[in-house]
Amino acid sequence: ILDIGPQTAAQYAQLIEKAGTVVWNGPVGVFEFEAFSKGTEALARAIAGSKAFSIAGGGDTLAAVDKFDIARQVSYISTGGGAFLEFLE
């Protein structure tokens, strides 16, 4: 699987819209290739437009945040990778 489809992206966007907190770790597609970036972009835009407190972590996630230019809309960005997930546990 190289990307999620538009229906799945829309379902995730609906969940994000209702959330109070969003933790994002990992893209949902091979976003480095334009043909497979639509799902990750939809997720990024949903998070950016959400009123939820949002946390993004991990190298690939941060690359997606940069690619879709949403860093200012994410509440907290962690560069910790595995340490980020360990902290959340």
Image (cartoon, rainbow, N blue to C red):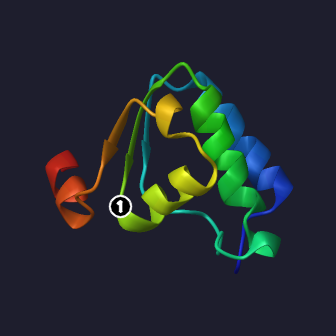
x and y percent of residue 86 in the render? 17, 57
Vertical position of residue 32 compared to residue 4: above or below = below
Going by the image, does 7 lie left or right of 33?
right
Image quarter of residue 69: top right
Vertical position of residue 68 compared to residue 38: above or below = above
Disc 1 secondary structure class: loop
- Please report the residue visible at 64 percent of the width from the left and 50 percent of the height from the top: 68
Vertical position of residue 76 compared to residue 2: above or below = above
- Please report the residue visible at 69 percent of the width from the left and 38 percent of the height from the top: 13
x and y percent of residue 70 in the render? 57, 40
- Please report the residue visible at 78 percent of the width from the left and 71 percent of the height from the top: 34
Q: Which residue is mark 1?
A: 58
Taking depth in this image into account, of 87 and 61 the one nearest to the observer is 61
Taking depth in this image into account, of 58 and 71 the one nearest to the observer is 71
x and y percent of residue 32 in the render? 64, 73
Q: Give neighbour class at mark 1: few <14, some 14-19, many 20+ (Cα, 10 Å).
A: many
- Please report the residue visible at 35 percent of the width from the left and 61 percent of the height from the top: 58
Type of residue at label 1? Answer: Gly
